[in-house]
Image (cartoon, rainbow, N blue to C red):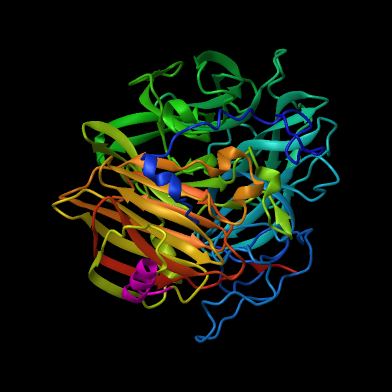
């Protein structure tokens, strides 16, 4: 992977190439404004995580985390539960997972074991002085509150290089010979520019992994890109599947024991740049266990001129026959059309019955973009944040099976009492920058009382005109990000050309991000998670999703609305504070 920075925190190789940044806004008049929305559900904390979690007892014999001192605890009294500590840096999120310092990037697929979810992400404790990543570990009971568990796989331990993306599985049937229930991680290691797949074993429930003597289990065949193995159990054929990112191809391999792998086929694309972090899973259509599709997913690079995407998570529905994936249609869909959801992983809940496991999955992604990943104006860490965990399902929308997303239900545990308004009409102003117009909408709509909040709105255009609704979030000091709905083009969008980072970022940062969304009975619904430096927008029950980082003026928290091209009616408007909940750190 290429990088203009002297140190690439992920690998010594090149970072993914970034697609063209040239694109046009959904409507020409939109160029007067920007749209940027930030979603957040985390908190500053210890070692390498910042996220919510209640007081849980330390796990006996768990390794002490190798992390910096604990950050100032988040407030817990009723009066201050929704206010971030004053000594936090301006962009430290309240409800999203972030490192306490240094660097983070790719999420690693979680699994359920011993009463907790086990989640890992790539972390570089040496950033920016040194290269390489390792697996950092966090656990949770609800995928909202987290406990810091320290490093699970160290980099540069076995002579094969640093530790990069892979996947961990529970070997229930002892196929690999390390004992039933052993946790097996197959991960990419890179040494002197050569990427190989190695096997690591944990016999303590996923807290520490050790490499086996026979690594690598899949050596590099002489290609440049050979990484990010996703391991899946194919129950129908009683075999393991590996999907591997190989440049512009996704390679499929099978194994009976997680050690010896046989190449089966490839899924080739020449229009999505460097493919990374693949995923493969089976899911029911519209909740019907008798009607299922396989989904192939990968981090990909779109074209802003062609499809309005730069980096993101592309996917195809189709069939898997044990050797080959056949897509239903050639064009990819995108799980999230914002600027900043990448390296997404999905998983199911092993505690559920088989039919229920097929109905719904969870997903989490990296809130960042390789075009500016190391340039974010965060002072105490770099690399962005983890998204909120989403629940995804495959629904038929306008005749096409489509992955939809919604914030995980347990996120509601952080919500405080909502403030509401109904039937608020925003009139189109002759001058969209008119201060008086914004003052009117500020007085008509409830204002945020916390840095992180959840906004639920129902928007409708007037019968006479199909205008554009713009909601400015984190407004202050002349800066803001915009979330909007354009009823003329049936699009939801985010713009951030007016936030404080826009002038210092590459042009791709300033481009409006949009997704098609048709009104249902004349109404578009938005469920928006706003945090200190991110916004996640779920439109029409997750038919369209947009996630982006954003950087307002420090301390700014205003909210206003305006209409362009016709009046807009807020049929309902609800804003709920999200409580600050720091990650629990084991000493």
Q: Position of residue 370 (x, y in %)?
A: 63, 38
Identify the magenta region: 436-447
Q: Position of residue 318 (x, y in %)?
A: 35, 24
Tally the marks: 0
Residue 112 visible at all:
yes
- Residue at figure coordinates x 69%, y 31% from the top left: 15
Q: Position of residue 304 (x, y in %)?
A: 48, 31
Q: Position of residue 338 (x, y in %)?
A: 47, 43
Residue 506 placement, left or right of 512: right
| Foreground pick, 110 / 516 | 516
Residue 201's place in the image compared with 13, above or below, is below
Residue 362's place in the image compared with 470, above or below, is above
- Residue 443: within the magenta? yes
| Foreground pick, 349 / 276 | 276
* Quarter of the figure that contains the C terminus: bottom right
- Residue at figure coordinates x 55%, y 26% from the top left: 242
Judged by its main secondary structure, the magenta piece is helix
* Quarter of the figure that contains the N terminus: top right
Residue 538's place in the image compared with 323, above or below, is below
Splitting the image into 4 quarters, where does residue 506 fall? top right
Splitting the image into 4 quarters, where does residue 90 fall? bottom right
- Residue 407: within the magenta? no
- Residue at figure coordinates x 59%, y 39% from the top left: 507
- Residue at figure coordinates x 56%, y 67% from the top left: 477
């Amino acid at each position: 992977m290429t990088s203009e920075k002297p140190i690439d925190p992920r690998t010594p190789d090149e970072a993914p190439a970034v697609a063209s940044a040239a694109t046009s806004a959904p409507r020409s008049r939109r160029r007067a404004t920007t749209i940027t929305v930030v979603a957040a559900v985390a908190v500053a904390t210890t070692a390498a995580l910042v996220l919510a979690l209640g007081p849980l007892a330390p796990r006996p014999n768990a390794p002490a985390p190798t992390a910096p001192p604990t950050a100032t605890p988040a407030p817990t009294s009723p009066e201050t539960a929704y206010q971030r500590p004053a000594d936090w840096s301006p962009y430290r999120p309240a409800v999203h997972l972030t490192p306490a310092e240094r660097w983070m990037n790719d999420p690693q697929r979680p699994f359920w074991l011993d009463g907790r979810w086990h989640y890992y992400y790539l972390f570089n404790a040496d950033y920016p002085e040194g290269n390489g990543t390792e697996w950092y570990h966090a656990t949770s009971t609800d995928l909202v509150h987290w406990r810091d568990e320290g490093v699970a796989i160290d980099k540069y331990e076995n002579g094969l290089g640093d530790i990069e993306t892979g996947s961990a599985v529970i070997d229930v049937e002892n196929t690999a010979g390390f004992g039933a229930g052993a946790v097996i991680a197959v991960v990419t290691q890179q040494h002197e520019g050569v990427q190989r797949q190695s096997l690591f074993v944990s016999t303590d429930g996923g807290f520490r992994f050790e490499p086996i003597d026979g690594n690598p289990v899949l050596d590099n065949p002489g290609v440049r890109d050979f990484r990010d193995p996703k391991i899946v159990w194919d129950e129908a054929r009683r075999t393991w599947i590996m999907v591997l990112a190989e440049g512009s191809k996704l390679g499929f391999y099978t194994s009976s024991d997680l050690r010896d792998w046989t190449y089966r086929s490839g899924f080739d694309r020449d229009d999505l740049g460097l493919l990374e972090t693949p995923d493969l899973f089976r899911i029911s259509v519209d909740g019907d266990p008798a009607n299922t599709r396989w989904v192939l997913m990968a981090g990909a690079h779109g074209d802003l001129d062609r499809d309005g995407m730069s980096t993101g998570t592309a996917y195809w529905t189709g069939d898997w026959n044990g050797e080959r994936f056949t897509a239903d249609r050639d064009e990819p869909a995108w799980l999230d059309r914002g600027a900043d959801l990448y390296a997404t992983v999905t998983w199911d809940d092993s505690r559920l019955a088989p039919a229920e496991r097929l109905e719904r999955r969870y997903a989490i992604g990296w809130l960042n973009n390789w075009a500016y990943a190391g340039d974010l104006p965060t002072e105490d860490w770099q690399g962005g944040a983890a998204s909120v965990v989403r629940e995804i399902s495959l629904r038929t929308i306008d005749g096409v099976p489509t992955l939809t997303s919604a914030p995980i239900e347990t996120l509601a545990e952080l919500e405080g009492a909502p403030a509401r308004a109904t039937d608020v009409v925003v009139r189109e102003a002759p001058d969209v920058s008119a201060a008086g117009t914004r003052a009117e909408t500020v007085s008509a709509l409830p204002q945020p009382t916390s840095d992180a909040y959840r906004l639920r709105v129902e928007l409708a255009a007037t019968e006479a005109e199909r205008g554009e609704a713009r909601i400015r979030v984190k407004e202050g000091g002349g800066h803001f990000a915009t979330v909007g709905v354009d009823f003329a083009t049936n699009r939801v969008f985010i713009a951030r050309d007016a936030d404080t980072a826009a002038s210092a970022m590459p042009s791709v940062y300033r481009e409006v991000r949009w997704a098609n969304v048709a009104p249902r009975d004349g109404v578009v619904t938005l469920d928006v998670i706003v945090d200190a430096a991110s916004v996640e927008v779920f439109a029409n029950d997750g038919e369209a999703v947009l996630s982006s980082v954003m950087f307002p003026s420090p301390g700014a928290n205003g909210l206003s609305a305006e209409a362009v091209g016709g009046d807009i009616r807020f049929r309902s408007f609800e804003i709920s504070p999200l409580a600050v909940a720091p990650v629990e750190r084991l000493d």
